[in-house]
Image (cartoon, rainbow, N blue to C red):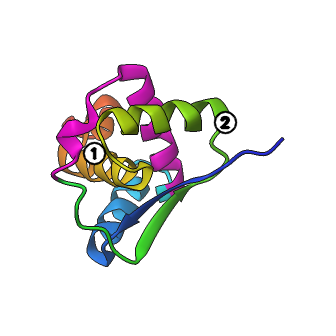
């Protein structure tokens, strides 16, 4: 079975932020992107909101490996609706998550013990 991958091109600083945040969650950056792609497809949020935060591409990248074909196709359509490339949409959802820290909140990492 051929499972494709999806990439987000980031600046070096943004790549470091994504990697650090992923580590906090017990993931690697690839796993974080994979999870965020699936979450976006489930929530069906409008990606136009990430367009403004996803303009600074760079030479560093995060690759979501082994993305099932149906998720890849659905995410491509989702990005196209917002007039974004897949890379820009992936970059945007990563950077939005790093800023909002929704996953950290959902798993209770922002709660004080």
Q: Which residues are magenta?
A: 30-52
- Between tags 2 and 1, which lies in front? 2
SS category of the residue bearing label 2? helix
Q: Residue at x 35, y 47 (%)?
A: 89
The picture places residue 48, in percent across and down from the top left corner, at: 22, 38
Q: Is residue 102 above or below residue 86?
A: above
In the picture, the quarter occupied by the C terminus is top left
Q: Is residue 7 visible?
A: yes
Dividing the picture into quarters, in which one does residue 68 lie?
top right
Q: Which residue is mark 1?
A: 97
Among the two numbered marks 2 and 1 on one chain, the one whose residue lies closer to the N terminus: 2
Q: Which residue is mark 2?
A: 69
Extreme residue in the right direction: 1
Rate crowding at label 1 as few (under 14), some (14 to 19) or many (20 or more) other CA atoms within 10 Å: some
Q: Is residue 8 above or below residue 101?
A: below
Q: Is residue 85 above or below residue 76?
A: below
Q: Residue at x 40, y 32 (%)?
A: 78
């Amino acid at each position: 079975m051929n499972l494709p991958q999806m990439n987000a091109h980031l600046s070096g600083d943004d790549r470091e932020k994504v990697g650090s945040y992923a580590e906090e969650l017990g993931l690697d950056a690839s796993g974080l992107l994979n999870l965020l792609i699936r979450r976006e497809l489930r929530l069906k949020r409008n990606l136009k909101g990430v367009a403004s935060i996803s303009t600074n591409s760079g030479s560093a990248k995060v690759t979501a490996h082994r993305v099932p074909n149906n998720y890849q196709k659905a995410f491509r359509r989702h990005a196209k609706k917002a007039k974004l490339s897949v890379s820009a949409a992936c970059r945007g959802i990563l950077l939005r998550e790093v800023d909002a820290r929704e996953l950290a909140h959902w798993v209770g990492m922002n709660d004080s013990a």
